[in-house]
Image: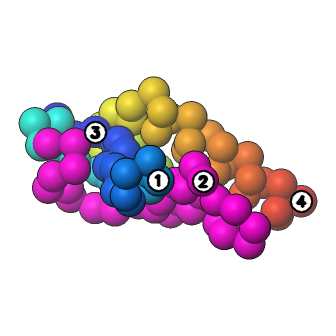
């Protein structure tokens, strides 16, 4: 089974997450199939807090990938931001 989840990076007390598609048996920060974007919870100033390739995320969901709860929230947030920019 394939899942869409967050993979943690960054330094101690300064997290940075990659949104990845991975096999459910893989370690949290281990091997992944594809990187879909990133989430920076500590973005300040002109830094981008969230970037997601919505087209590839939709593709993986159509193929049966199950997003985790947090990944699902971030995908919805990215969709809202994309529609706000387009409007």
- Determine whether 86 is above or below 6 in the image: below
Give the Cα separation between the discs numbered 1 and 4: 33 Å
> Which callout, 4 or 2, points at the residue further toward the start of the chain?
2
Magenta: main secondary structure:
loop
- For the residue carrying disc 3, how many other residues have a C-alpha within 10 Å: few (<14), some (14-19), or many (20+)? many
| Residue that carries the numbered disc 2 in the rendered image | 42
Q: Which of disc 2 and disc 3 is earlier in sequence? A: 3
Q: Residue at x 48, y 33 (%)?
A: 70
Residue on which disc 1 sits: 14
State the image coordinates of residue 28 (x, y, percent, origin top left): 22, 42
Provide the residue designation for mark 3: 3
Q: Earlier in the sequence, mark 1 or mark 4?
A: 1
**Is residue 41 rendered to the left or right of residue 64?**
right
Residue 32 lies in the magenta-colored region: yes
Q: Tell me if residue 32 can be seen.
A: yes
**Marked residue nearer the N-terminal end (3 or 4):** 3
Q: Residue furthest right?
A: 87
* Residue 74 in the image, given as x and y percentages of width and height: 56, 42
**Residue at the front extreme, as displayed:** 12
Mark 1 in CB contact with mark 2 (< 8 angstroms): yes
Q: Toward the viewer: 69 or 63?
A: 69
- Residue that numbered label 4 is attached to: 87
Over which residues does the magenta segment extend?
A: 27-55
- Pinpoint residue 76: horizontal percent, then vertical percent: 62, 40
Q: Position of residue 6 (x, y in %)?
A: 37, 45
Q: Quadrant of the N terminus?
A: top left
Asked if marks 3 and 2 touch (Cβ < 8 Å), the reply is no
Q: Residue at x 10, y 36 (%)?
A: 25
Crowd band around label 4 with a 10 angstrom C-alpha radius: few (<14), some (14–19), many (20+): few
């Amino acid at each position: 089974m394939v899942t869409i989840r967050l993979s943690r990076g960054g330094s101690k007390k300064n997290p940075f997450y990659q949104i990845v598609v991975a096999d459910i048996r893989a370690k949290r920060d281990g091997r992944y199939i594809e990187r879909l974007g990133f989430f920076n919870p500590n973005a300040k100033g002109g830094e981008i807090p969230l970037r997601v390739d919505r087209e590839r995320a939709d593709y993986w969901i159509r193929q049966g990938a199950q997003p985790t709860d947090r990944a699902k929230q971030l995908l919805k947030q990215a969709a809202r931001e994309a529609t706000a920019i387009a409007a």
